[in-house]
Image (tube, coloured by chain):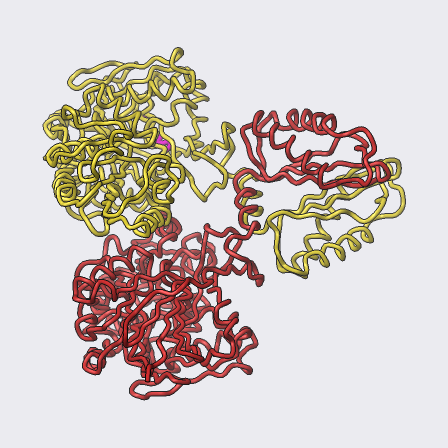
Chain colours: A red, B yellow
């Protein structure tokens, strides 16, 4: 009897940071790991976020059995509100992620219709032909899991996002014994986090940051403000510990930070030293040397607490002389400029600012090369698929796996939409499927190659020139020279003169004889062509040109 | 007799990287150091570059005696074509910068009217009451100088951009003896490069890169492509040396790289090993293991050679199997994403790519803290002004100077437009003057707070909605419902329905009685208000709204 081969279909997160989603397909059953978003930034003007293109899953809707979530970060959970209405399947998640997802789905009024279930350590559950076991990993949020997925074709180990931190804040280390056990059992395929696969050595432990924070808060002459990720629960714990040790009170600013601290405390992920947490109002009444504030804004987000503070635009918090500000994060690629701007503004207001360039106030949550080697060694997989990361990270991890003894042909360097098939007899690539970004423009999904984005880029660079032409409604003959207006175009003093010349040229270029039927499309094309030529020749500019015809 | 005090007026480069310009004013004489540009990127959509606001100088045009250039980088020379037509003064520059400026001014047809003069080592020249002596510094372009400016008020030392490289490629080290001599003489004020003042220790020598390149080119199995800055002449020399050592030929791709290599070779800044340089055409005929290509594109510039190669869009160069690509640069803040994209694309095409994260293929050209201490110690200035850098760098350098013994009150942490006055009796701050960015939109100067930029940002995010309304030319009464079109707005399926509802509402909202005279301004404001309300209420969008009225 031959067993059904296992297909691996990455739908997000391979070749681009964020928006993680991996489908495993075995015959008539599909299980999906993670369901994340990414923030495209300037690549897609006006667009808030991107979700994975799930056409592949929608076409096989009847096969999809469940979505498994590895941890509570947005790049692993954020697309659920958009995917679940289209794909009504159970969602399995670790306890903290479960809590965060509930909050999110409630916001979208999707909680009642959702089927949320818990992934707990040491238990196994079945989803169709897949038997799933979660195992603990260290990451920059508590309750992060990797997944061991047993299938008739063999055991797949998916690490999720991880690092190996031997001295984590919450005492939960990556479960190396479980990885060893899987290795003993025989791993068909290892899917392992490649975000930092280019980095030599080890990622430092969160404990390093703990020591730095303890020292910085101890030495600070007055108030301390700490900005970090709202989901970085262990960092918040470290700040609480340091504040307690130095007899300070802690208050929290920024809506998401307040919500997360409350939720994590309630769920037991944050252990509040008794009496340490106070309201912002109370903190403002205490002597500065007794206060620590924890805020959002470590990525320079315009409406966050720390950015408002830096701009002297926060209702309750102003920078005071001798304030120490700790930016306990590093800039996500693309955010460097806004993070630097925030730091500059804080320094301008007189704060002493500690940030990753000058102090050990942050470590990230992904494994470096020595840690990746540990996992490869423990699991000794037959097939290897680097996941999570830009292509250069995936390629570096693939090369590392080959060096570590995975057979050349068994390393599958996949990108989103590539399909690999593994069976006992071997692995092969199948034809590519549809994958990629779907941008959400407000609530509207638009394709990554939508002309809307191209139009916005043109508008951003050179503005818009609008040419309004009145046509005789009976003959289609232009009645007079067009009206020309612009927005975001130019302050060039010759503009009005060029526009009036252009109006005359457009008018002259058009037919004076009646044409039946009136061909508005032809006329607007001609108007556009004339205008484009003149604006480029006379002004060197290529604005968006919008001809409008009125039949009068 | 009291001597006239010296004023220092930074007009660019203090608090923002790039666009360097510092004015020194003594009674009726002003001398200006550097005249650079910066590239504002996404901060100013559609804008190519920013130059310093020179209002202060233009208002005192009769006092300005000269512009002194420290070295040939664009952030120190790039604004000359825009400033010289307004301020016809002699420009003094080191030999290489002199050559580069000549080329630039010729492009702008300004060469004939320009008065260019050489700064040479060991000579002094007078400009009004200022006696100027150039001294050598190491930087990432040859022929970089600091300036010792002797004035009746005392000696000012301006470091330019520098690092202390004891083993530079061209054998020219920062002239520590000159700095010591100035210290002996007594330095009134030190103005010192702060770009990397947050970095502990020493900036590595260019020699480190030389060793890496020698090894990488030696070990490469086939062709090697090196992308770097076109102005980084010493890096190009290192590549030529390594190519020669390993029996390879070198060709150059990218217009600016070709021009710079030719110019630098002609002027003697590049020493071409005999027979090593070949044409690109010739290189393409050689076996890959005998070829090195040097290209532009280290910052991911869209039209550069390396980006075209990465996109498989270069006419003469395609990535071949086993190609090694070396990105011998680091991303300037803001360019991280495009540089990463270029690397990802190269890896996707099968190249083995070396870049700063994984190999020592770049060092930068600015001093770290230990080097800054050396300069402070040698010069022992009475007053200290950190120059060149973001505010956090300036502040770090100011703190360092205090630690090194400069009196608290004598450290002047200035930003562009701040004015400091130094005399034998002491230093003080004077009132701020106009300074800041002037953006060049094409060739048009626009203010940093121009509404044009705000319009473009709105257009980029939400596009434009155009409402064309026909008014009776005699009565001003709308003839029919307006025509509504949009660009870059939305793909929302309800758009047309919202537009037709909006057309009706706009029409209904307007007066049906003739009003004399016709108040078009009032009508368009009303149209705008109605449209803005509907688009936000019904679609949650805030596009640019452009009402156009036609009188028919």
- Asked whether, in this view, residue B49 is left or right of residue B13, the answer is right
Give the residue at x 72% y 54%.
B499
Q: Where is residue A421 drawn, in percent x and y? A: 35, 70
Q: Is residue A68 magenta?
A: no
Q: Is residue B90 above or below residue B498?
A: above
- Asked whether, in this view, residue B273 is left or right of residue A410, the answer is left
Query: Quadrant of the rendered structure where residue B418 is?
Result: top left
Give the residue at x 50% y 33%.
B441
Q: Tell me the quarter of the image containing the N terminus of chain A.
A: bottom left
Give the residue at x 61% y 32%.
A532
Q: Tell me the quarter of the image containing the C terminus of chain A.
A: top right
Q: Is residue A180 visible?
A: yes
Residue closer to the observer: A57 or A234:
A57
Q: Where is residue B83 drawn, in percent x and y? A: 42, 22
The magenta segment is B7-12
Residue closer to the observer: B99 or A290:
B99
Give the residue at x 20% y 63%.
A402
């Amino acid at each position: 009897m031959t067993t059904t081969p296992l297909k691996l279909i990455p739908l997000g997160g391979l070749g681009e940071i964020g928006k993680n989603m991996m489908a495993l397909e075995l015959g008539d059953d599909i299980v999906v790991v993670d369901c994340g978003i990414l923030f495209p930034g300037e690549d897609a003007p006006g667009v808030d976020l991107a979700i994975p293109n799930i056409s592949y899953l929608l076409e096989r809707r009847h096969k999809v059995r469940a979505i498994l979530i590895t941890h509570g970060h947005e790049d692993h959970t954020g697309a659920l509100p958009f995917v679940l209405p289209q794909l009504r399947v159970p969602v399995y998640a670790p306890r903290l992620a479960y809590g965060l997802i509930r909050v999110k789905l409630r916001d979208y009024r999707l909680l009642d219709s959702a089927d949320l279930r818990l992934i707990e350590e040491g238990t196994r559950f079945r989803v169709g032909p897949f038997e799933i076991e979660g195992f603990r990993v260290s990451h920059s949020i508590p309750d992060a899991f990797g997944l061991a997925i047993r299938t008739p074709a063999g055991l797949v180990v998916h690490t999720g996002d991880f690092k190996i931190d031997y001295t984590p804040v919450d005492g939960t280390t990556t479960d190396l014994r479980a990885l060893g056990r899987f290795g003993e059992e025989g791993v068909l395929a290892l899917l392992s986090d490649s975000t930092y696969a280019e980095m030599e050595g080890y990622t430092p432990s969160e404990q390093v940051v703990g020591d730095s924070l303890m020292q910085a808060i101890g030495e600070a002459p007055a108030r301390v403000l700490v900005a970090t990720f709202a989901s970085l629960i262990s960092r918040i714990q470290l700040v609480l510990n340091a504040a307690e040790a130095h007899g300070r009170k802690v208050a929290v600013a920024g809506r998401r930070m307040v919500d997360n601290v409350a939720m994590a405390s309630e769920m037991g992920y944050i252990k509040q030293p008794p009496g340490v947490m106070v309201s912002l109002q109370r903190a403002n009444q205490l002597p500065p040397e007794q206060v620590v504030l924890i805020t959002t804004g470590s990525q320079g987000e315009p409406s966050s607490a720390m950015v408002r503070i830096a701009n002297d635009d926060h209702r309750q918090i102003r920078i005071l002389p001798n304030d120490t500000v700790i930016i306990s994060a590093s800039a996500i690629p693309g955010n460097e400029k806004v993070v630097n701007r925030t730091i500059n503004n804080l320094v301008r207001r007189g704060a002493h600012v500690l940030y990753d360039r000058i102090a050990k106030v942050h470590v990230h949550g992904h494994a470096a090369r020595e840690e990746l080697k540990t996992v490869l060694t423990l699991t000794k997989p037959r097939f290897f698929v680097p996941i999570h990361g830009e292509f250069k990270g995936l390629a570096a991890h693939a090369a590392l796996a080959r060096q570590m003894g995975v057979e050349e042909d068994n390393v599958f360097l996949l990108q989103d939409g590539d399909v690999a098939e593994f069976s006992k007899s071997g692995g092969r690539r199948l034809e590519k499927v549809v994958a990629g970004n779907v941008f959400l423009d407000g609530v509207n999904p638009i394709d990554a190659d939508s002309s809307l984005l191209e139009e916005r880029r043109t508008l951003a660079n050179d503005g818009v020139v609008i040419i309004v032409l009145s046509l005789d409604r009976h003959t289609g003959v232009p009645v007079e020279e067009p009206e020309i207006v612009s927005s975001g175009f130019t302050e060039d003093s010759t503009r009005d003169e060029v526009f009036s010349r252009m109006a005359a040229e457009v008018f002259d270029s058009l037919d004076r004889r009646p044409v039946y039927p009136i061909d508005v499309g032809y006329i607007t094309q001609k108007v556009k062509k004339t205008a484009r030529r003149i604006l480029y020749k006379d002004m060197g500019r290529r604005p968006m040109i919008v001809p409008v015809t009125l039949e009068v």
